[in-house]
Image: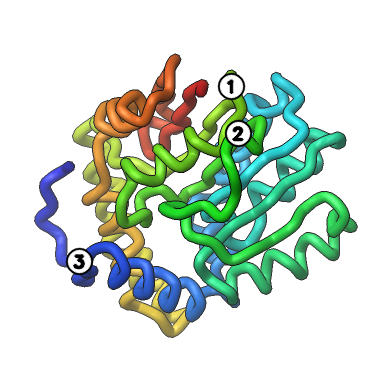
Amino acid sequence: MNNTKHATTPVTPDKGKKEQMRSMFNRIAPSYDMLNHLFSCHIDRWWRHRATRLAASRQPRRILDLATGTGDMAIALAQRIPQCEILGLDLSEEMLSVAQRKVKAHNLEQRIILRTGDAEHLPMSDKQFDAVTVGFGIRNFARLEQCFQEMHRVLQPNGRLIIVELTTPKNRLIRTIYEFYSFRLMPLIGGWISREKKAYRYLPASVHAFHSPERVVEMMQGAGFRDCAAHPLTFGIAHLFTATR
């Protein structure tokens, strides 16, 4: 992991972290979409476009979208791949409530099913999906290696794993600017709008403390995936992780 000099909100492992994540995202759900797009200057839409385009290349019929949140990835997948059915799982009931309203507004209720669920213990049998996707969620998983094992288990042979996640840029200048923006401006603006300043301190801190892209690739390989790769996006502010079962 990257060493951090920034103050973080203490998070206890496993069940404690899961409950804290669920509670935090429940609280910020009403303003999450607006702030997410604001802080990324809408670049997150392009990152998601890259992920869905890659997913569509193999025309999957069944997709599992983990940490589906407010449903942006699931909706983007459904719009790009007309024949696919998507199951979106998330710990936060309030995020899923926002997602359900968006799914209904896009008339995708027949193709996107939303459920509460834990990525460490996926509630489905082996080899059920052609693709597994995660958009900006794996850094919040308590046991990432176990989650990768579960993703591997539920994928069909030759199924694809596609993940977009925020990462710390390696370039010193970019990293300095990024960290000033993340640790100074985000908590100020996010806390003012959402009334949850602690959450918008945790979110950038979780990126700073997250594994290096190289370590994430090692974890995917350790779970049994092949053709594992990490593709930097926008100066390394995010990465697109890909693997095949």
Is the residue 221 above or below the residue 203 in the image? above
Mark in the foreground, 3 or 1: 1
Q: Tell me the crowding category of disc 1: few under 14, some 14 to 19, or many 20 or more residues within 10 angstroms, Cα based.
A: some
Task: Indicate the secondary structure of the residue bearing disc 2.
Answer: loop
Seen from the viewer's position, the closer of residues 205 and 177 is: 205
Mark number displayed over residue 157: 1
Is the residue 94 above or below the residue 127 in the image? below
Residue 62 appears in the rendering: yes
Coloration of the structure image: rainbow
Give percent across and percent down for residue 233.
Answer: 45, 30
Which residue was labeled with disc 2?
127
Residue 49 appears in the rendering: no
User: Residue visible at 26% across and 46% down?
Assistant: 210
Residue type for callout 1: Pro
User: Residue visible at 61% across and 28% down?
Assistant: 156
Q: Tell me the crowding category of disc 3: few under 14, some 14 to 19, or many 20 or more residues within 10 angstroms, Cα based.
A: some
The answer to the question of whether label 2 and label 1 lie on touching residues, with beta carbons closer than 8 A, is yes
The image quadrant where one finds the N terminus is top left
Q: Tell me the crowding category of disc 2: few under 14, some 14 to 19, or many 20 or more residues within 10 angstroms, Cα based.
A: some
The answer to the question of whether label 3 and label 1 lie on touching residues, with beta carbons closer than 8 A, is no
Give percent across and percent down for residue 82.
Answer: 86, 36
Mark number displayed over residue 8: 3
Give percent across and percent down for residue 11.
Answer: 23, 69
